[in-house]
Image (cartoon, rainbow, N blue to C red):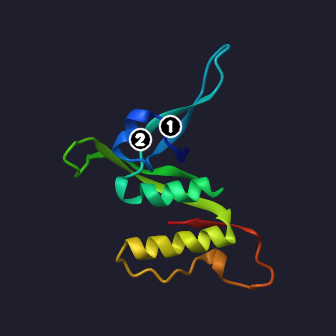
Amino acid sequence: MVSVVHETDPNSLQHDRYACSVKRIKEGRGVLMARLVNVGHVPLEISKICHYFNIHGGEISGTVEDSKPRRSPIPSGGLKVKLDLSFKGRGDLIDKLKLLLRDAYTWDYTGVQAQDEGDENGKEDNEESDF
């Protein structure tokens, strides 16, 4: 299980002021307690969207979809690992996220998720969407 949070390291923020790090829980032993460990960053192309979602109260979590690391296409190198992320937040924040993703990418996305179907009056204030 991983979570995506706003990066606080000044070195990372020099390259991308919207940098978001991917963290996992590392179990401790003895007096050491579990802590979050930085295992990477979200790609520059979506860091601004993830940053916006985080600072407005949304939570991003996920799992590793494919553990085989691949070479990153960016010139500075690095590895990329596929993640299956879930975005959880207020209904209006989820709607804004869908708009931002639709504008940022050219794939044919209808915007309909399983959580969107059903009675509009019974809609809860919190929604969860998988992308």
With respect to residue 23, does 49 lie above or below?
below
Q: Position of residue 40 (x, y in %)?
A: 41, 40
> Judging from the image, what secondary structure is the residue with disc 1 in?
loop
With respect to residue 70, does 110 lie above or below?
below
Going from N to C along the chain, the mark reached first, 1 or 2, is 1
Mark 2 highlights which residue?
Answer: 13
85 displayed left or right of 46: right
Q: Position of residue 23 (x, y in %)?
A: 51, 39
Residue 128 visible in rendering: yes
- Furthest-left residue in view? 75
Going 64% across and 17% down the picture, which residue do you hit?
Answer: 32
**Disc number placed over residue 25 in the picture, else none:** none
85 displayed left or right of 55: left
**Disc number placed over residue 8 in the picture, else none:** 1
Residue 59 visible in rendering: no
Give the amino acid type for the residue marked by disc 1 in the picture: Thr
Total tally of numbered discs in the picture: 2
Give the amino acid type for the residue marked by disc 2 in the picture: Leu
Q: Nearer the viewer, residue 82 or 15?
A: 15
**Neighbourhood count class around disc 2 (C-alpha, 10 Å): few under 14, some 14–19, many 20 upward:** some
Going 74% across and 85% down the picture, which residue do you hit?
Answer: 120
Give the CA distance from mark 1 to mark 2. 7 Å
- Location of the N terminus by quadrant is top right
**Neighbourhood count class around disc 1 (C-alpha, 10 Å): few under 14, some 14–19, many 20 upward:** few
Q: Position of residue 12 (x, y in %)?
A: 39, 38
Going 54% across and 58% down the picture, which residue do you hit?
Answer: 52
> Judging from the image, what secondary structure is the residue with disc 2 in?
helix
Q: Position of residue 84 (x, y in %)?
A: 48, 57
Are dots 1 and 2 in contact, CB under 8 Å?
yes
- Furthest-top residue in view? 30
Going 44% across and 80% down the picture, which residue do you hit?
Answer: 109
107 displayed left or right of 8: left
